[in-house]
Amino acid sequence: MSTDTPVDWTGLAPQLVDAAQQDRAWYLRIARELVAPGDRLAVDVGCGAAGMALAIARMMTCGRVVAVDAHPAVLDAARDYIHAEWSDPRVRVEPLRANIPAEITDLRDTLGAPADLVWASAAVHHVGDQQAAVTALAGLLAPGGRLALAEGGLPEHHLPWDVGLGEPGLENRLHAAQDRWFARMRAELPDSRRMPYGWTEALRRAGLSPVTTRTALDEQPPPLADTARRAVLEALAARVGRLRPTGLLTAADLDVWDRLLDPADEEWLGHREDLFRLSARSVHLGVRP
C-alpha cells in the first residue's frame, strides 16, 4: 500500500485485471459469506483491479462499494474494469485513491459514514507497521461491522515436483526464494516493524471480537483452460523476473526457468498438460463490538 514499496505496481496493473478474472468465482464465494443483508457501505482496501469490490457489490441490494488503492496505475486498471463489468445503479462502485494507514483519517471523512464491511487482500503486508494498519482499518467500522483480511494461507503451486530439467523441487525453491525476497521487501518499508504474531491476534489487538479464520482450497486441476494456462505462465515469469536480480535463485535454476518460460524452447511449460493451480487462501475476520 505504501508508494515506497519496491513493487512495480505500474507493470503489474495488467496482471491484476487477469487475476481479477481468474479469481472471480473465489471472490463471489467469499463475498457471499461476508456480506450481510443490511450492508450499505463496503470498502475494498488495496483493491487491485476491483475484482472483490465487484463481487461484494453483486451481493448487496443497494448502497456503495469504495475500491481504494494508493497507486494511480492500479486505480486506472480498477476504474476500467469497473466500467466494463458494472452497470447496476442500485449499488455504486467507486475507485478512490488513499494510502493506508497514513491517510486513514481522510478516508474516514471521505466515506462519510462508518463501513459495514472492510476487505483487505494481500494489502496490509505492504505497510511497514502492519498492526497500525489493521487498527486503522478497524477504525473505519460501524458497530457490528466486519474487517476481513485475506492474508496468509499456502502459496500457489503449478508444477509437478520433477519437471525433467535440473534438480527436482524447482518450484519449492522458487517459493523459498520468494519468502526471502518478501523478508527483504518488508525490512525496506518505511517504519518497518516486525509483527511476531498472527493475523487473528492483530485483529484482537485492534479491538475486534469475535475473531475467526476460514481457509479455503483453491484448485484448478489439469488440464488447464488456455486462459488459466496463460495466467500461470505469466505469474511464473513475473516471479522469476522479480527474483532474477536478487541473487536468491541459483544460476542453475535460472537456466531451467529460462527454458521452461521460453515459447521457442521444446521444454516450454505451455506445451505441458500437467500444469495446475493449487493453493489455500485464508480469510481472517474480526467484528467491531
Image (cartoon, rainbow, N blue to C red):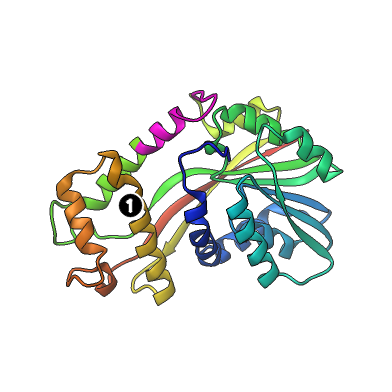
The amino acid sitting under disc 1 is Gly
Give residue 110's position: percent from left, percent from top. 82, 43
| 89, 97: nearer the viewer | 97
Q: Residue 143 vs residue 50: left or right?
A: right
Q: Which residue is pictured at 39% across the width and 76% down the height?
A: 226
Which quadrant of the figure contains the N terminus? Answer: top right
Task: Give 213 or 198, whichever is nearer the viewer.
Answer: 198
Task: Assess disc 1: are there few (<14), some (14-19) or many (≥20) residues with their C-alpha within 10 Å of its C-alpha.
Answer: some
Q: Does residue 129 appear left or right of residue 43 in this picture?
A: left
Residue visible at 22% across and 72% down in the picture: 264
Q: Residue 136, located in which quarter of the rendered image? A: top right
Residue 274, compared with residue 36, is above or below; it is below
Residue at 73% x, 35% y: name it.
104
The answer to whether one can see residue 56 in this image is yes
Magenta stretch bounds = 181-195
Which residue position holds label 1?
241
- Residue lying furthest right: 112
Instruction: Let me know if residue 141 appears in the view.
Output: no
- What's the residue at 58%, 33% (across, down)? 200
The x and y percentages for residue 88 are 79, 70
Q: Is residue 180 above or below residue 30?
A: above
In the rendered view, does 203 fall on the left or right side of 219?
A: right
Residue 241 x %, y %:
33, 52
Q: Give percent across and percent down for residue 130.
A: 57, 30
Q: Secondary structure at mark 1?
A: helix
Left or right: 111, with 58 as reference point: right
